[in-house]
């Protein structure tokens, strides 16, 4: 089984992946680690700020990793923001039947009410070297883009609009493997 987690910045993709890893003991692939490995090794001239181009560059690689894991009957959690809204388009039913997908996004109201908490928890699982902080308006814009893009593609979104930990835990409890 593949668990594919995407979503806007600061929505807890890595935290969800970590909690699922602890519960199910699946291997985990961070698309951010893949991105930085390719950039730091000189295998790509892209920079961490090239989000759209990075999605186009990274997704074909990630897609083939997912296909390999399915073919090898390996469980894998894949998390990161570089998943296109039409990610299902290039995978046939054999692969899609093995993938559980989730997109995380926060409502504007949640961000307005909890912005300080969101930023305070931005390094709970990973220590961001640059102290990466998105201003509230940029964070809302990023979340709106994920909501719009993935809804238009017909994907379900875990929309964070109330107690974050309760919503995330409810998802984990309902997940079942």
Image: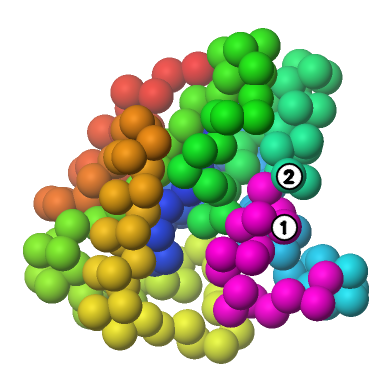
Q: Residue at x 32, y 23 (%)?
A: 174
Q: Residue at x 82, y 19 (%)?
A: 72
Image height of 38 relative to 87, above or below: below
Q: Are marks 1 and 2 in contact (CB under 8 Å)?
A: yes
Horizontal side of 12 relative to 177 (left or right) equals left
Horizontal side of 41 relative to 167 (left or right) equals right
Q: Residue furthest bottom?
A: 130
Q: Percent position (x, y) of residue 112?
A: 13, 72
Q: Percent position (x, y) of residue 109?
A: 10, 63
Q: Percent position (x, y) of residue 77?
A: 61, 37
On residue 80, the disc is none
Reading the image, the residue beneath label 2 is 60
Q: Percent position (x, y) of residue 51?
A: 56, 68
Residue 164 visible: no
Horizontal side of 18 relative to 94 (left or right) equals left
**In the structure shown, which secondary structural element does the residue marked by tag 2 occupy?**
helix
Image height of 72 relative to 40, above or below: above
Q: Residues within 10 Å of mark 2 (few under 14, many from 20)?
A: some
163 or 65, nearer to the observer? 65
Q: CA distance from mark 1 to mark 2?
A: 7 Å
Image height of 50 relative to 11, above or below: below
Q: Residue at x 69, y 79 (%)?
A: 47
Reading the image, the residue beneath label 1 is 57
Task: Tell whether position 49 is magenta.
Answer: yes
86 or 7, nearer to the observer? 86
The magenta stretch is 44-59
The N terminus: image quadrant = top right
Q: Quadrant of residue 173?
A: top left
């Amino acid at each position: 089984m593949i668990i594919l987690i995407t979503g806007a910045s600061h929505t807890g993709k890595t935290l969800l992946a970590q909690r699922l890893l602890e519960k199910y003991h699946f291997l985990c692939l961070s698309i951010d680690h893949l991105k930085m490995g390719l950039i730091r090794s000189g295998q790509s001239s892209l920079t961490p700020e090239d989000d759209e181009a990075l999605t186009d560059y990274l997704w074909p690689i990630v897609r083939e990793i997912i296909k390999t894991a399915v073919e090898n009957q390996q469980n894998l959690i894949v998390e990161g923001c570089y998943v296109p809204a039409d990610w299902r388009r290039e995978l046939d039913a054999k692969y899609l039947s093995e993938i559980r997908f989730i997109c995380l996004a926060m409502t504007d109201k949640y961000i307005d009410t909890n912005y300080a908490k969101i930023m305070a928890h931005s390094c709970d699982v990973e220590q961001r070297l640059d102290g990466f902080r998105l201003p509230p308006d940029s964070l809302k814009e990023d979340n709106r883009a994920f909501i719009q893009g993935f809804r238009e593609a017909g994907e379900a979104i875990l929309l964070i609009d109330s107690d974050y930990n309760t919503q995330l835990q409810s998802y984990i409890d309902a997940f079942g493997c």
